[in-house]
Image (cartoon, rainbow, N blue to C red):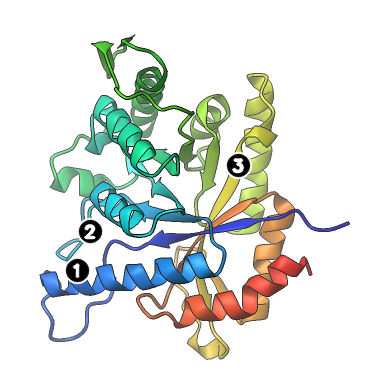
């Protein structure tokens, strides 16, 4: 029996983790280099048969030159049409959900239906504090996210829309033009009591945080139980997995970070681990490469890892 098919998307990096020596990390020239690197990566992703590009949503990386999510996504989608573009993932505190619904509707229109709205409750308290956004407890953030989803869905489907919640609401609001087909909603995260319950109830896509295959398998089982509780087939939800990848011919060059699971090793090692994720139920991989902005890791992945996965070995 052949292996289940999987698809791939590339995660656009909004900033350079490592700044070249002697260069001010705030330099706008670095941002322009980043834009050029992103375009090269999108072109390679398209040529390799990737079908999505994902843009991270952060307010910044310390003092590093940093590209904002939605404006950069719109620019990339306009220059490279035909791919699907998604947010990885929009922190709900950063934007009023009614405004986000309107932005998503506009991106849906401008990309001819090729936009995926990824949402998350936020996970970086210091970032929120630096930019003046509240960062309540995880439980409160998730309650706010559920209300926000209700607002977003209502604006996409009702005209006018009214939602009255404790945290978010709209009163006789219009989102014109309304989407001519449903905009896929992705929820990112793996909290087993609350986040995966929201995935079961509302999401079209689920994005699992970077982690080993055993963690994905456990959370997939939890998600299935939440789906059963609301009478939903978990097969309706695209199960996707973030994979930070370091693929090198020389094992001594492999990059590993403490506290973060990286799919790392030789091309055979990386292919073997991704096959294990596929066999555990992953249907879409969102990948990024540890040697970015170099193209070498991505090219190695396309030339030596993808063929193994496509052949189902």
Task: Say which residue label 2 marks.
Answer: 67
Give the Cα distance between marks 3 and 1: 33 Å
In the picture of the structure, the residue carrying the numbered disc 3 is 238
Q: Where in the figure is residue 57, as x and y percent of width and height?
A: 31, 49
**CB under 8 Å between discs 1 and 2:** yes
Identify the secondary structure beneath mark 1.
helix
Quarter holding residue 116: top left
Label 2 SS:
loop
**Residue 174: percent from left, percent from top:** 27, 16
The quarter of the image holding the C terminus is: bottom right
Residue drawn at (47%, 38%), measured in percent from left and top? 187
Q: Is residue 73 left or right of residue 32?
A: right
| Residue appearing at x 26%, y 35% in the figure | 93
Residue positioned most to the right:
1
The image quadrant of residue 311 is: bottom right
- SS for callout 3: strand
Q: CA distance from mark 3 to mark 2?
A: 28 Å
User: Reading the chain from its start, which is encountered first: label 3 or label 1?
Assistant: 1
**Residue 22 in sight in this render:** yes
Kindly identify the residue that appears in the image at 35 percent across and 76 percent down: 293
Q: In the visual, does 236 lie left or right of 118?
A: right
Horizontal and vertical percent for residue 99?
Answer: 24, 29
Q: Which residue is mark 1?
A: 31
């Amino acid at each position: 029996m052949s292996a289940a098919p999987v698809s791939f998307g590339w995660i656009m990096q909004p900033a350079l983790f490592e700044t070249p020596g002697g260069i001010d990390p705030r330099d706008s020239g670095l941002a322009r280099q980043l834009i050029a690197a992103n375009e090269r990566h999108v072109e390679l992703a398209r040529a390799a048969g990737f079908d999505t590009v994902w843009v991270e949503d952060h307010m910044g990386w310390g003092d590093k030159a940093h590209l904002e999510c939605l404006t950069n996504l719109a620019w990339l989608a306009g220059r490279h049409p035909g791919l699907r573009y998604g947010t990885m993932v929009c922190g709900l505190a950063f934007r009023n959900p009614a405004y986000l619904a309107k932005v998503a509707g506009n991106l849906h229109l401008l990309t001819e239906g090729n936009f995926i709205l990824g949402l998350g409750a936020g996970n970086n308290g210091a970032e929120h504090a630096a930019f003046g956004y509240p960062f309540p407890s995880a439980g409160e953030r998730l309650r706010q996210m559920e209300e926000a989803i209700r607002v977003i869905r209502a604006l996409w489907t009702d005209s006018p829309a009214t939602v009255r919640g404790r945290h978010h609401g709209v009163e006789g609001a219009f989102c014109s033009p309304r989407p001519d087909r449903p905009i896929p909603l992705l929820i990112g995260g793996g909290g087993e009591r609350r986040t995966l319950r929201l995935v079961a109830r509302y999401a079209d896509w689920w994005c699992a945080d970077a982690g080993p295959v055993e963690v994905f398998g456990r959370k997939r089982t939890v998600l299935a139980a939440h789906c059963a509780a609301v009478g939903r087939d978990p097969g309706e939800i695209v199960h996707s997995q973030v994979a930070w990848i370091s693929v090198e011919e020389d094992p001594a060059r492999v990059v590993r970070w403490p506290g973060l699971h990286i799919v790392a090793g030789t091309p055979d090692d990386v292919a073997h681990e991704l096959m294990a994720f596929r066999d555990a139920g992953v249907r879409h991989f969102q990948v990024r490469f540890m040697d970015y902005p170099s193209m070498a890791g991505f090219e190695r992945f396309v030339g030596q890892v993808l063929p193994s996965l496509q052949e189902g070995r």
